[in-house]
C-alpha cells in the first residue's frame, strides 16, 4: 500500500511532534514543578502556602498528560529509543516517578490535619516533587548530549553498561541545574500571574530574578562546554532517510564540537538559542517591572528556546552511544515502521487539537488570581 507521505517525511514529522510534546510538558507542568520548588521559600504562613498551592491546584493533574503523551510517543515512534533509555536510565526514572508520586499525595494529604508539623512535612513533599524531577530531567538531557553507555549486538539487543551515579557527571549536573533554574523562573512567573498581590508575589519575583540570572549563566556555560569540550557525534557514512530501521547500518563517530554543525548548515536554527537568552532577559525585565504577562511570556519563550536548542543541535541523533557510536540511534534509523507512523499521525491530527482546545478552555474558565479570602469560603480549594 502506497501512503501519501514518504517514510523520511513521517520520521521528521514525528521528531517535530516529540519536540512539541516535550515543550508542552515543560510549559505546563514545568511551572507546577517550579511552584513546588519555590513553595517553602516564597510562602511563610499556612495561609500564604495554601494560596501558592492553589495557583496550580486546579490544573496540575491535567498538565501531567503532556508527560504521559511524551513517553507514549517515544514508545510508539522510536521503540529502540524507548527500550534503551527506559531500561538504561531505570533508576533515574524510578527516582523521578517516586518524586512525582509524592506530589499528588502531598496535595491531597496536606490539609487533612491542622497541625503545623503535619502541613510543613507535606509542603516539603511538594518541594521534593518539584525540585527532584526538574533536576533529573535536566541531568537526563545532559546525558543524552554526552551519549549513553549502551551498545547493540548483531541481533539488535541493547546492553547498557552504565550505573546511576555515572549519570551525574559535571556537564550533566550543569544541565540539571539549568533545568531547575529554568523551571523555577517559570514557576515564579506563574505565581506573579496567579498569586494574590502582596508579600508572596514579591518574594517570588526575587527568587525568580535569581533563577533568571542563573538560567542565562548556566545556558551560556553549557553552550561553551558544547563548543570547546569533548561533546558531539557526527554521521560519517551515508544516512538513508527512507531506509530500514537498523542503527547498525549507520556509520557514526564521536566528534567534539559536532553539536554545533547544524548551525553552520542551517543558520535559521540560531533562533533557538537566541530565544533561550532573549526569553530569560524578557522574563527578568517583566519581574523587575512587575509585569506578570511579560514575565510569564519571557519564561515561556526561554523554555521553548532552551529545549529547542538541544533538539536542533543533536539532529538527526535522538540517543547517541558513548561507548559504541555505531549503535547510536537517529531519527532515521530507529523509528517504527512507515505504516505505524502514518496511523499514529492520523490519530494525532484528530485528537491533539481536541486536547489543545480543551486545555485552553480549562485555563479560560479557571483564569484569575487566587486570593486568600477564597481560602475561607471555597471548600474545593486545597
Image (spheres, rainbow, N blue to C red):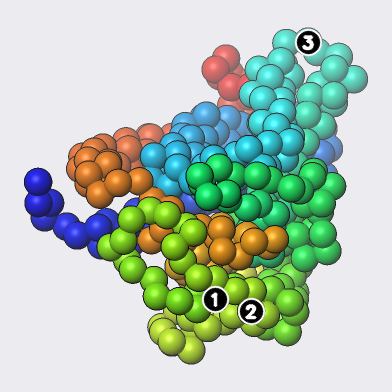
Return the disc, 1 or 3, that comes first in the chain's sequence: 3
Q: Residues within 10 Å of mark 3 (few under 14, many from 20)?
A: few
Disc on res. 113: 3
Please state if 331 lies on the left or on the right of 48 as rendered: left
Query: Residue drawn 82% across and 32% down?
Result: 124
Cα separation, mark 2 vs mark 3, equals 57 Å
Element class at badge 1: strand
Residue 244 in the image: state x and y as whole percent: 33, 56
Q: Looking at the rendering, in which quadrant would you find the C terminus?
A: top right
Cα separation, mark 1 vs mark 2, equals 6 Å
Q: Is residue 63 visible?
A: no
Return the disc, 2 or 3, that comes first in the chain's sequence: 3
Q: Are marks 1 and 2 in contact (CB under 8 Å)?
A: yes
Residue 50, compared with residue 262, is above or below; it is above
Q: Residues within 10 Å of mark 1 (few under 14, many from 20)?
A: many
Q: Based on the displayed image, in which of its 4 quarters is residue 229 positioned?
A: bottom right
Disc on res. 145: none
Query: Residue drawn 43% across and 47% down?
Result: 78
Q: Residues within 10 Å of mark 2 (few under 14, many from 20)?
A: few
Front residue of 294/177: it is 177
Front residue of 98/112: it is 98
Residue ID for mark 1: 234
Return the disc, 1 or 2, that comes first in the chain's sequence: 1
Element class at badge 2: loop
Residue ID for mark 2: 255
Residue, far front? 154
Front residue of 200/109: it is 109
Query: Residue drawn 50% across and 70% down?
Result: 251
Residue 193 in the image: state x and y as whole percent: 56, 50
Please state if 326 lies on the left or on the right of 218 as rendered: left
Amino acid at each position: 500500500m502506497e501512503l501519501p507521505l514518504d517514510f523520511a517525511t513521517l520520521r521528521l514529522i514525528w521528531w517535530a511532534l516529540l519536540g512539541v510534546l516535550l515543550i508542552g510538558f515543560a510549559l505546563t507542568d514545568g511551572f507546577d514543578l517550579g511552584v513546588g520548588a519555590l513553595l517553602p521559600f516564597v510562602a511563610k504562613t499556612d495561609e500564604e502556602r495554601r494560596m501558592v498551592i492553589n495557583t496550580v491546584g486546579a490544573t496540575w493533574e491535567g498538565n501531567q498528560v503532556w508527560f504521559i503523551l511524551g513517553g507514549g510517543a517515544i514508545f510508539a515512534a522510536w521503540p529502540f529509543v524507548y527500550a534503551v533509555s527506559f531500561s538504561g536510565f531505570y533508576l533515574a526514572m524510578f527516582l523521578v516517578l517516586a518524586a512525582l508520586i509524592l506530589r499528588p499525595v502531598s496535595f491531597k494529604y496536606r490539609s487533612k490535619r491542622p497541625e503545623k508539623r503535619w502541613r510543613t512535612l507535606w509542603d516539603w513533599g511538594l518541594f521534593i516533587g518539584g525540585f527532584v524531577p526538574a533536576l533529573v530531567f535536566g541531568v537526563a538531557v545532559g546525558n543524552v548530549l554526552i551519549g549513553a553507555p549502551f551498545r547493540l549486538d548483531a541481533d539488535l539487543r541493547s546492553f547498557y553498561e552504565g550505573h546511576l551515579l555515572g549519570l551525574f557527571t559535571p556537564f550533566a549536573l550543569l544541565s540539571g541545574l539549568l533545568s531547575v533554574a529554568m523551571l523555577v523562573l517559570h514557576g515564579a512567573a506563574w505565581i506573579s500571574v496567579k498569586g494574590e498581590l502582596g508579600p508572596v508575589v514579591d518574594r517570588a519575583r526575587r527568587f525568580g530574578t535569581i533563577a533568571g540570572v542563573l538560567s542565562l549563566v548556566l545556558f551560556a556555560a553549557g553552550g561553551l562546554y558544547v563548543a570547546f569540550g569533548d561533546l558531539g557525534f557526527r554521521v560519517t557514512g551515508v544516512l538513508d532517510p527512507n531506509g530500514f530501521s537498523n542503527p547498525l547500518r549507520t556509520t557514526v563517530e564521536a566528534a567534539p564540537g559536532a553539536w554545533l554543525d547544524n548551525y553552520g548548515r542551517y543558520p535559521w536554527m540560531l533562533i533557538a538559542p537566541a530565544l533561550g537568552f532573549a526569553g530569560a532577559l524578557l522574563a527578568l525585565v517583566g519581574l523587575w517591572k512587575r509585569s506578570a504577562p511579560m514575565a510569564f511570556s519571557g519564561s515561556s519563550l526561554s523554555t521553548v528556546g532552551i529545549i529547542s536548542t538541544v533538539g536542533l543541535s543533536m539532529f538527526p541523533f535522538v540517543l547517541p552511544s558513548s561507548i559504541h557510536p555505531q549503535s547510536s540511534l537517529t531519527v532515521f534509523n530507529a523509528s517504527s515502521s512507515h505504516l505505524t507512523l502514518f496511523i499514529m499521525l492520523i490519530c494525532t491530527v484528530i485528537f491533539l487539537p481536541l486536547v489543545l482546545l480543551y486545555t485552553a478552555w480549562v485555563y479560560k474558565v479557571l483564569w484569575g488570581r487566587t486570593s486568600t479570602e477564597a481560602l475561607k469560603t471555597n471548600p474545593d480549594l486545597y
